[in-house]
Amino acid sequence: MSVHSSRVILASASPRRRQLLLLVGIDHEVRPADVDESLLPGEPPDAHAERLARAKAHAVAEREPDAVVIAADTIVVVDGDVLGKPRDAQDARAMLRRLSGRTHTVLTAVAVALAARTESAVESVAVTFRSLRDDEIDAYIATGEPMDKAGAYGIQGYGATIVERVDGDYFSVMGLGLRRLVELMARVGAPYTFPS
């Protein structure tokens, strides 16, 4: 049984994750999982991301036990602090100022569930921003792109112009590490094969 002969559900409303699955030929349905994304007291960022990815996968897999359920969670970490989605433009401005000219970590956890089995892992990627002027930050915020993204930027959109370098898996920064996904699908018994 390959992933192509299975029903696949993406437990996320992210258009970027959708796009990445389609990029590698994985047909899927979208069923966003509704889970509490609060950070637990003392929870390390990588454990937080992995717990959320697994919770999202379980929430959908309970209702769809015969489907391959793919879930992910991406967080941005700088100075040990987790930067989620900005609350408003002022919050986005503060995040972008903090990331300007510096390297931060993007953690993307991926979970794959099939039947009673769930496999998960976390990719860690170092991303460096060029130095940003305040007028550039304001112009970027005005595009609206930062408002629904962890760390207030999207690497696959206008945000590509503010990233100086990526050390690690680019697709994980977008929100779904494809190499890691393929590894996890094989572990649950739904291996990826190249479409013929």
Image: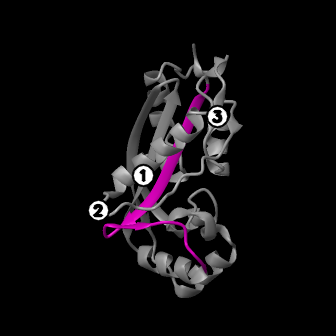
Instruction: State the image quarter where residue 143 is shown.
Output: bottom right
Indicate the secondary structure of the residue bearing disc 2: loop
Label pair 1/2, CB-CB below 8 angstroms: no
- Of residues 27 and 156, which is closer to you in this image? 27
Inter-mark Cα distance, 3 to 2:
32 Å
Q: Crowdedness of circle 2 by 10 Å Cα count: few (<14), some, many (20+)?
A: few
Q: Nearer the viewer, mark 1 or mark 2?
A: 2
The magenta stretch spans which residues?
Answer: 67-88
Q: Crowdedness of circle 3 by 10 Å Cα count: few (<14), some, many (20+)?
A: many
Residue at 59% x, 38% y: name it: 60
Residue pointed to by mark 3:
9
Inter-mark Cα distance, 1 to 3:
19 Å
Residue pointed to by mark 2:
42
Residue 137: percent from left, percent from top: 57, 80
Inter-mark Cα distance, 1 to 2:
13 Å
Which secondary structure dominates the residues rendered in magenta? strand
